[in-house]
Image: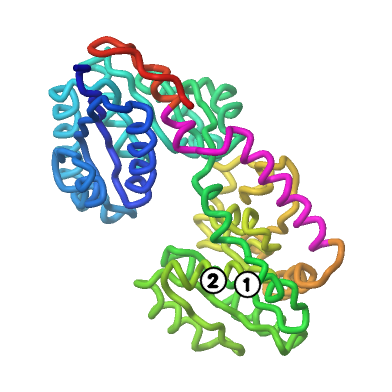
């Protein structure tokens, strides 16, 4: 009987768990009858797959400068615990997923103690946007990066980082959920009673800075389109804060919570007003014309101008290499400008057509890795694994 395939995982948060689950499912298909043994760090869904945990994922699921500092001694201990656990486990492969501040430090420790273990990191850190020196520093201890965005392999090569393979984005598997069915299509086509998404972000700082200006922009759009319906999908725990901030709006949006309500809102939307971030790619793949904005504290804006050297901060624009989604950053993110761009996106005119045509191209580029991002990730990772300890893995179907 073949020796089990031993996979070590570091998934520091729920999004990493989701990617890991898809990887495990695809890997099991590749392994066939060969047993898969899992150890590392993950949430309840990974534990249900048989993951042997080194410690509770909640110990490292922390965001924000203040909380990280407060928990720094524990985080440092958990880095050491993870590295020791991985080395003792003797895996055929170490897969670290996102959470780069934690995962990449663990990878460095593992490489120093067990250089024979192949190490793959899934979700490229945004070194192409800021702190580009991280790319070169990753190279000694990361054998391959699995990228979600098609421009990242070229960017990492330019920055002398680890070898990077574009494997596709998990959003590609959700297109049927994000786009209207034939029965829902009339909602999106309705210019007289358009549904407009309002997406001020999923972080409290984003919401605090964008809600006032978004509220004024919504008021201006409502004056020009009295029959418009505004829908704001909110992360459940932030819904009360959003409702409080919306109290000052001249026209209120309908707040909906939960994934089902969010997807329904996306399918029916004719246009969107959104914060910069991954949601702009989600909207592009949903084929919803978008106006994007970012607004932060003055010191954050000044720091960003020094550190971020990009022609755009909007992912669809970066993927295309040209601007199709209008973006308004900091002092340009004013209600009048946002409202004018949103009204143009609602109308069947040049501005809307240009975005929709660009989104078709975005999808084509995003699909260039192949149909199944998880299978692509498994294939790219297993290419580093020597068949010692068991037979060669079967080729991808």
Crowdedness near tag 2: few (<14), some (14–19) or many (≥20) residues, C-alpha within 10 Å: some
Q: Are marks 1 and 2 in contact (CB under 8 Å)?
A: yes
C-alpha distance separating marks 1 and 2: 6 Å
Residue 147 place in picture, x, y as percent: 50, 34
Residue 215 place in picture, x, y as percent: 59, 80
Q: Nearer the viewer, residue 102 or 85?
A: 85
Q: Is residue 274 magenta?
A: no
Q: Which mark is residue 188?
A: none
Please give left or right for residue 246 compared with residue 155 in the image.
Answer: left
Compared with 112, 294 (above or below) is below
Residue for point 43% across, 84% down = 244
Q: Nearer the viewer, residue 154 or 67?
A: 154
Residue 348 place in picture, x, y as percent: 83, 69
- Which residue is label 2 attached to? 264
Residue 269 place in picture, x, y as percent: 64, 71
Report the colour scheme.
rainbow
- What are the residue bounds of the magenta stretch? 351-378
Q: Quadrant of the N terminus?
A: top left
- Which residue is label 1 attached to? 268
Q: Is residue 368 magenta?
A: yes
Residue 307 in sight in this render? yes
Secondary structure of the residue carrying tag 2 is: helix
Q: Quadrant of residue 306?
A: top right
């Amino acid at each position: 009987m073949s020796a089990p395939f031993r996979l070590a995982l570091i998934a520091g948060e729920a999004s990493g768990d989701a990617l890991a689950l898809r990887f495990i499912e695809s890997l099991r298909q590749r392994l066939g009858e060969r047993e898969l043994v899992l150890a590392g760090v993950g949430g309840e869904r990974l534990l249900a797959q048989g993951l042997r945990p080194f410690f509770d994922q909640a110990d490292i699921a922390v965001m924000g400068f203040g909380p990280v500092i407060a928990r720094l001694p524990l985080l440092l201990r958990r880095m050491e615990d993870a590295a020791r656990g991985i080395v003792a486990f003797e895996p055929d492969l170490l897969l670290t997923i996102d959470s780069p501040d934690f995962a990449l430090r663990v990878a460095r420790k593992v490489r120093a103690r067990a250089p024979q273990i192949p190490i793959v990191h899934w979700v490229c850190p945004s070194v192409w946007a800021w702190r580009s020196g991280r790319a070169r520093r990753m190279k000694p201890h990361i054998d391959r990066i699995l990228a979600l965005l098609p421009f990242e392999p070229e960017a990492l090569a330019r920055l002398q980082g680890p070898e990077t393979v574009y494997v596709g984005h998990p959003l590609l598997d959700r297109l049927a959920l994000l786009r209207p069915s034939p029965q829902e299509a009339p909602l999106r086509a309705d210019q007289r009673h358009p549904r407009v998404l309002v997406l001020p972000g999923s972080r409290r700082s984003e919401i605090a800075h964008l809600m006032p200006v978004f509220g004024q922009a919504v008021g201006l759009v409502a004056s020009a389109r009295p029959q418009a319906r505004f829908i704001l999908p909110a992360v459940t725990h932030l819904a009360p804060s959003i409702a409080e901030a919306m109290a000052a709006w001249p026209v209120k949006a309908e707040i909906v919570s939960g994934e089902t309500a969010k997807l329904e809102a996306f399918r029916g939307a004719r246009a969107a007003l959104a914060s910069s971030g991954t949601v702009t790619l989600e909207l592009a793949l949903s084929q919803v014309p978008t106006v994007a904005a970012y607004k932060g504290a003055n010191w954050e804006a000044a720091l960003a101008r020094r550190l971020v050297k990009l022609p755009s901060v909007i992912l669809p624009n970066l993927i295309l290499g040209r601007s199709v989604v209008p973006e308004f950053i900091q002092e340009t993110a004013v209600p009048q400008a946002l409202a004018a761009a949103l009204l143009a996106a609602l109308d069947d005119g040049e501005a809307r057509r240009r975005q929709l045509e660009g989104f078709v191209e975005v999808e084509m580029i995003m699909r260039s890795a192949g149909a199944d991002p998880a299978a692509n990730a498994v294939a790219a990772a297993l290419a580093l694994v020597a068949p010692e300890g068991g037979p060669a893995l079967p080729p991808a179907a």
